[in-house]
Every structure is written in structure tokens, then in C-alpha cells.
Amino acid sequence: MRPQRFLRALSITLGIAVAAFAQSAIGAEKGLLIIKIEFGILNSQGSDLSHLSVLDRFDLMSLTTKQEYSIPSPLHVAAEEVDEGIYCLYSFKMAGTSLDLPYCGEPYFKVAAGHINNAGLWRYGVSFERNQQRLIFGARNLESVLNEAKKYHGEVLRKYGMHLDN
């Protein structure tokens, strides 16, 4: 093989290797998580919310790495790129307070790299009078959460390969 052909072949091989490495370093380990949080004041029975409250943010934590993600609480479904792993809802911060409400219990949810991961709707309530806080439910209404994500986060859904009608 002539030196010029050898160098060209080596250059192409190195270019492919660098591109593959860059692809993995840029975000091949990330997945898109869509999730909706309803947060509010518990009713007198403590079984559901009497009314919704505004969150400043909610936090997720990877159970594997202990890495935390702080997600500003949107009015609608959240769409966040996070590392692959198993997660818990870790805490909630109410708007207008410095109070962090910790939680990291079941159900947990998995985020797969390179995919759209729908964690559904979660409802969490607090009662300051009874010093009580609890998860009312998690991972429900997957279809409506996905439809809301399509409405508000179409661009990032397309990035992960979803074809939208508009």
C-alpha cells in the first residue's frame, strides 16, 4: 500500500473512531424523561388533594449514582434529558418558601438511554396542620402525559425519534 493511501485509510479510521467517541460522550447515555407532577394540600382525610399548590422545582435522584437533577416545575409536563438509570422523586420545593420536602420512595422509574421515557403523572400532597406528607399516586395517565408532552415539547421529542403529526 502506498504511503498516501495508508495515511488516508488511517485518517478515515481515526475520524470514525473519534466520531463514535464523541457520540457517546455527547449524550448517548442520556434518555428523555417526561413526567408531570401535581403537588398540593392534602384534604381532611389525607387521601387526595384539596387544592393544588405551585412548586418552584422538584428533584430526581439516580439510585445508582446518587446524582440529583433539579427540574424547574413547569405548569405542564416536564421533559428533561437525564442519564440512564433508576430514579426516585427525591424532593419538592414549594413556591414562596425555603421548605424542601424530602421523598425518595417507591415506585421508582427507569430511564433508558436514547429513548423517550414516560414516567406519567405523579400526585404528592402535604398537610402542615397534621405534619403529614405523602405520595398519593405515581406513574398514572401515561397517554395524557405523552399527549401533553407532544403539545409542549415537540422539538425534543423529535430529537429522540418521535414523529409528530404537525
Image (cartoon, grey):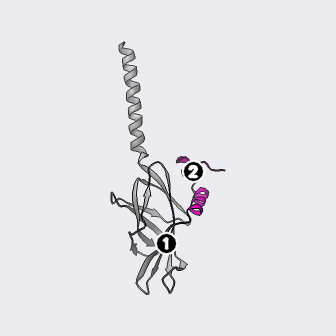
Q: Would you say the magenta stretch is mainly helix, strand or loop?
A: helix
For residue 142, above or below residue 30: below
Q: Position of residue 107 (x, y in %)?
A: 43, 67
Q: Position of residue 145 (x, y in %)?
A: 57, 62
Q: Is residue 142 magenta?
A: yes
Q: Which mark is residue 28?
A: none
Q: Which mark is residue 155?
A: 2
Q: How far apart are the alpha carbons under marks 2 and 1?
A: 29 Å
Category of crowding for the residue at label 1, using alpha-carbon neighbours closer than 10 angstroms: few (below 14), some (14–19), many (at least 20): some
Among the 4 quarters of the image, the one containing residue 106: bottom left
Looking at the image, which residue is at 41% across and 36% down?
20
Among the 4 quarters of the image, the one containing residue 105: bottom left
Q: For the residue labelled by badge 1, is the local secondary structure a helix, a strand or a loop?
A: strand
Between disc 2 and disc 1, the foreground one is 1
Viewer-nearest residue: 18 or 119: 119
* Mark earlier in primary sequence (2, 1): 1
Residue furthest to the left: 65
Query: What amino acid is labelled 2 in the image?
Result: Glu
**Magenta stretch?**
140-166
Looking at the image, which residue is at 46% across and 52% down?
31
Specify whether 145 is left or right of 17: right
Q: For the residue labelled by badge 2, is the local secondary structure a helix, a strand or a loop?
A: helix
Specify whether 108 is left or right of 47: left
Report the residue marked by disc 1.
Answer: 137
Looking at the image, which residue is at 37% across and 19% down?
7
For residue 115, above or below residue 137: above
